[in-house]
Structures are given as C-alpha cells and as structure tokens.
Amino acid sequence: MAGAIAHAPFLVFRNASGQEQVVSLEGDNPRLTIGRGSSTDVWLEWDPEASRVHAALERFGQEWTVVDDGLSRNGTFVNGERVHGHHRLADGDVVRCGSTELLFVARSDEGHSRTIEPGAATTEVRPDMTVQVPTVDAAAVDLLSRTPPFSRLDRDDLAGIARLAVPRHYRAGEVLFREGDLGDTCFVLRSGSVRVTRTHSDGRTIALAQLRPPALLGEMAMLGSARRSATVEAVEDTAALAVLAGDMRRLLMSRPVIAMAMLDELAARLRAADDQVSQRAFRNVPGRIAEALLGQVTGEEGEAVVSLTHAALADIAGTSRETVSRFLAQLERAGVLTLGRRQITIHRPATLRNYIY
C-alpha cells in the first residue's frame, strides 16, 4: 500500500488473494489478537494453519510484544524462532502465525522511503513522524515509592522502572496469571484486590493470600524464567502496572541498588512464608483467623475496612466457614469489629492482635 504514513507502528501482510493489507497499531488499545476466529482483531480467515486465537500483540510503553501463551496449534515465530510467552518486537521483525507472515514496522527512517517485503509483499513507507521522548507517569512513580521493595529507591530509579511499566486492567474474576504459566511479567497493584491460590494434585485449592495495593506480584519472573507457583485472580475490578521480566532484568543488571532491594524483599517473603507454615502448624484457629484479618490491615491506629467474605477468610486461615462465622460473631459482640455485606470493619486492630498466641 504505497504512501502509508508511519505515524505509528503497523503490520503489513498479504491476504488469500495476494492483496496487501496494513493494520495500524495506533490508538488506545494496548492489545490486539491475531487468528482465524472472526472475533480477532487481525482476522486470518483464509489461513487453515492459524488457530482461532493464535497470538496477540501487546503494547508495553512505547514498544510492542508478540505473545503466544502456548495454545496455538502450530506456534508463533519471529524471524524463524518460536515464541514462548512474550517476545519484544523490533522494527523489521517478521511474525509468522500459521502460514501467514506479518511484517512489523516500528518507524520509517527519517528522510528516506523504504521498501518492506514480508514474503513477496512490497510497500513504500514515507516518513512523517515526530520522535517523542517517553514521559514518566508521576502517579506510577508515587505508587512504586510506596511498594516494597521499590520504596527504598530514589526518584530517578523509580522513574526508570515507571518508564517500563504499562497499565493493565482486570475485571472481577479475571485471572492475571495461572499456576504453571511461564513467568515473564511482574505486576504492581494499583487499585482493587487479588486472590492468590494454589491447587493441590488432588484438585483441592488453597487460598494463600488476598492482596491490595501497594503490592508486587510475580516478582520471581524478574530473576528467571520459572513457571508460576500460584494463580492470581482479581477479586474486584483491579488495575495494575505490568513490567516485562526481561526489561526488569536488564534494569537490575545496570542498577545493582535495585537488585539488592529485590533480594532483600525476596528474603523477607521467604521468612514470611516460613512463619505462615509455622502458624498453620502451631497456632490455634482463632489466632489464625485474627492473623489473616490483620494481614489485610496496613496499620493499627483507627478503623480499617477489609473486603473479605467469610469463605475467603476461612481459606486463608485454613479452617471452615462456620468456624470463621462463629469467631467473627464473638469479635463483633466484643466491639472489636462490625460485620457488613462482603466486608468487615475492624475498629480496634491492636485489640485483635491480642487473640494471636
């Protein structure tokens, strides 16, 4: 398609009749799906080797990644190499979904026209664009400054992380990632709440925690390509900042102070996990319930509202819903808290701690 204007990245490919098509990646949509299904954004209806939802393109900051979650039948390839999880796209990369090749064009060279050849396709791209330096989201910097382990970093380091972060939004019940998935993204909760669960080999599910902002999720992805050890699901509509693990690892290597902060946080989480195991083994049931409630409270002064159902609290405390309901009724009679619909108002967090022994 001669004369295409390179204001934004775009894809170039040929359809079944050999006609060239250009898909602009301009706009606010941070994710586009590619596949044979009619509901996809890039519809490869002619390609029998493409899966119904074959792959996706996701925007991270000023750049784009191609994502294959392992569900495509024949795999997704970039320049002949199979994609596992996220792969950052560079200008001129050729993405193959099924038998269709799509050329990714990030920008045109200033002052020049260029010929693009995805397979046999030819397109002239003429430059007409302004290069912008990515701005820093002040709200993202503020959020990071309140989130361990980033809270100990200076503003310049926080800004460096914020530049890598991309906003993500999840509806209640939507899964951020599943146990066993490849860990290639970490998240910082911005609003809402999530439930962390793990599934036993016999099918039973145990709730490990319910988290609210500020909280870091999937941090192990920063240190390696291990599989997720738990499932994280949005309890309510939730917003988060997402950072590709590869980007974060490069930042950790260039800024040792950030790497040390991460190691300190991981050590603290290991100690907390050891404590949780000990609590379940030796602490009585009321103590476990009180501990689970206090785990949702940021301080011990004034009232705190906890959005937890009795069933969710029972999962975290490792007991039955009936036992939780009886103990909460006892605490309500004592004036420690007030029970509401899907929430608990804790009037005296310090008093609640007296039940832990």
Image (cartoon, grey):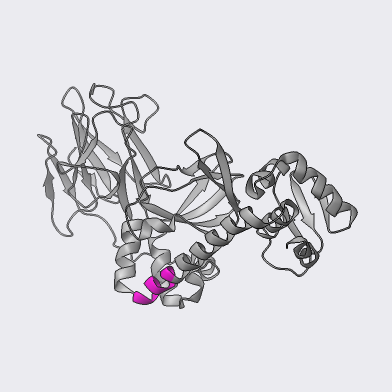
Q: Determine which quarter of the picture holds residue 310.
A: top right
Q: Residue at x 39, y 43 (%)?
A: 181
In the displayed structure, 321 sits above or below 349; it is above
**Residue 160 appears left or right of 342:** left
Going by the picture, which residue comes out furthest to the front?
A: 282
Q: Nearer the viewer, residue 228 or 174?
A: 228
Give the vertical position of 149 relative to 44 (above or below).
below
Q: Is residue 294 left or right of residue 230?
A: right
Position of the N terminus by quadrant: top left
Q: Residue at x 55, y 62 (%)?
A: 272
* Residue 4 locus on image (x, y percent): 22, 43
Q: Is residue 135 visible?
A: no
* Residue 174 on image: x %, y %: 53, 39
Q: Position of residue 124 (x, y in %)?
A: 14, 44
Is residue 189 something that shows in the picture? yes
Quadrant occupied by the C terminus: bottom right
Q: In screen coordinates, is 263 left or right of 342? A: left
Q: Quadrant of residue 2?
A: top left
Give the image location of residue 219, x and y in percent.
43, 58
Left-right relation of 116 to 154? left
What residue is rendered at 53% in x and 56% in y? 189
Viewer-proximal residue among 50 and 202: 202
151, above or below 100, in the image: below
Which stretch appears magenta? Answer: 256-263
Please say whether residue 226 is one of the residues in the magenta stretch. Answer: no
Instruction: Identify which residue is drawn at 59% across, 58% down.
Output: 278
283, above or below 262, in the image: above
- Assign the magenta stretch its main secondary structure: helix
